[in-house]
Image: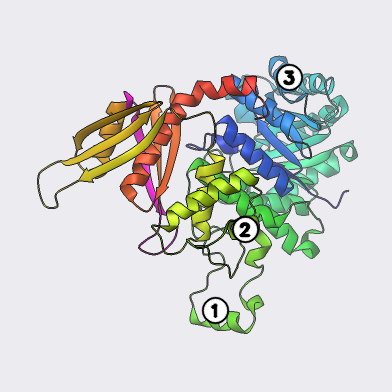
Amino acid sequence: MSDRVIVFDTTLRDGEQSPGATMDLNEKLRIARQLEALGVDVIEAGFPAASDGDFNAVKVIAETVSQAQVAGLARASAKDIDRAWEAVKNAKHPRIHTFIATSPIHMEFKLRKSPDEVLAMAVSAVKRAASYTDNVEFSAEDASRSDKDFLVRVFTACIDAGATTINIPDTVGYAQPDEFGQLIRYIIENVPNADKAVFSVHCHDDLGLAVANSLAAVRNGARQVEVCLSGIGERAGNASLEECVMALKLRPEYYGVECAINNEQLYPACHLLSMIIGRPIPANKAIIGSNAFAHESGIHQDGMLKNRDTYEIMSPQAVGRKTTDIVIGKHSGRNAVRTRLEELGYRLDYDQVNAVFAAMKELADRKAKIHDEDLEALVFSEVYRLRIPDRFRLGNICVQTSMGSNMPATAAVVLQDRDKEVRLAGFGTGPIDAAFNVISQICGTKAELEKFSVNAITGGTDAQGEVTVNLRDGKHAATGRGADPDIIVASAKAYIDALNRLEHKEKDVISYKQNPTE
């Protein structure tokens, strides 16, 4: 039995199924590159048969990533498996991941198949996948509610058919740590050809036990964990990559295993995801939350001043939260900015550093001090958001409202529509509503606002506000983000960003087909 745990990241597949977490092709590629820098062993890049967009994203990632294995998900059908192979075949280390449900409730009501029929479908799928590659993973969906002896039969047959990884999912987050650990041990001990496969787990967080169940499985012989950055995913999410990894790294004597993750890239990876999907990291989030290394209690503070180990089991630096004496402001030079970005985990080229530096100088004219979070927001807006040229750009905006009056708020907007400047004024029930009404009229959109949220990037009265909006226009939905010390301006930027993303839904696919490595 190997003493190394394989880290299989499914942020780009299961994670993206989290409501509101949809990413475009460029954003998925950014995440994939960050996952490779993080050191994950396997990147599940998507479900190629689900859509042309998913297929293209998996194909681009497979052709870009060089160190990690790239997996494509496929149902137990020839069509899905063929499509998955077509997407991953150019990867340096391709994997096909096929699955079928094995629990009584899924077989009867979803599949309408008998156990013997399900077994035959599983074996057939694995054989077809194995005809393309010797790196085949088989998952028994809803395994935690399946008959354990039926699982033994299925897994034995699938290994004989060519599966090299056997995944045992707790699909609905039903299992408890002790019983899940016992299930893993029972399967490994009773599958006669268990030595020919790596046993894996994929746990969901419906009861808040995804990490606990994953770690219990490792204690009982599992040597692959399927996880997501920040624990995002279907419903309540998946096991959190950063929590699983740091538990294994901090307690090697307990788990007796190691993993290849570069833990100093944990915070940069999770923060990048947060900025891309527009979800702030909760302050109390383990490992990466802003309060994870904050101490307010006098007793705790006293202990920390005497010895940090009294109340910190890991350092902020261990997970990529750097501390520094360099203060970034309007008088800072380009080299100081570049150095600070590197300390924060961002590897930018010369032109990208220049773009962030210029934006920092502009922001510094409005803020006394530039915080790390401000720099990271600039990296996102100036670098990670780069894609085909936006159609709409905010020129200027002026909003007026009367306190304690029945007069409606008014907004005057100057917007650039490609090479044409458009000016328009209008009304709304409040300043944000007025701004959005005018922008939507200029852009000629009927998109509906589904979500609006504001988050302060830093503390202080001069803090930048980060606004996230979710728009839906028919079958398409998009998330837009904007940051500015003025909340009205940030809101307008976010709204326009979402409109541009809706505009690019089809164009991104065409662009990547023509230039797959850009």
Circle 1 Cα neighbour tier, 10 Å, few/some/many (<14 / 14–19 / ≥20): some
**Mark closer to the chain start, 2 or 3:** 3
Residue type, label 3: Glu
Residue type, label 2: Asn
| Residue with the mark numbered 2 | 335
> Which quarter of the figure is the C terminus placed in?
top right
Image position of 302 (left or right of 264): left
Mark 2 and mark 3: Cα distance apart in space: 44 Å
**Mark closer to the chain start, 3 or 1:** 3
Asked if residue 87 shows in the view, the reply is: yes
Residue type, label 1: His
Mark 3 and mark 1: Cα distance apart in space: 56 Å
- Viewer-nearest of labels 3 and 1? 3
Q: Which numbered marker is on residue 326? A: none
Is the residue 118 above or below the residue 214 in the image? above
Image position of 312 (left or right of 152): left
Q: Which residues are magenta?
A: 443-464
Q: Quadrant of residue 28?
A: top right
Is the residue 228 above or below the residue 441 in the image? below
| Residue with the mark numbered 3 | 86
Q: Quadrant of residue 40?
A: top right
Circle 2 Cα neighbour tier, 10 Å, few/some/many (<14 / 14–19 / ≥20): few
- Viewer-nearest of labels 2 and 3? 2
Q: Secondary structure at mark 2?
A: helix
Image colouring: rainbow
Is the residue 137 above or below the residue 276 in the image? above
Circle 3 Cα neighbour tier, 10 Å, few/some/many (<14 / 14–19 / ≥20): some
**Mark closer to the chain start, 2 or 1:** 1
Could you say which is closer to the camera, residue 365 or residue 369?
365
| Residue with the mark numbered 1 | 300
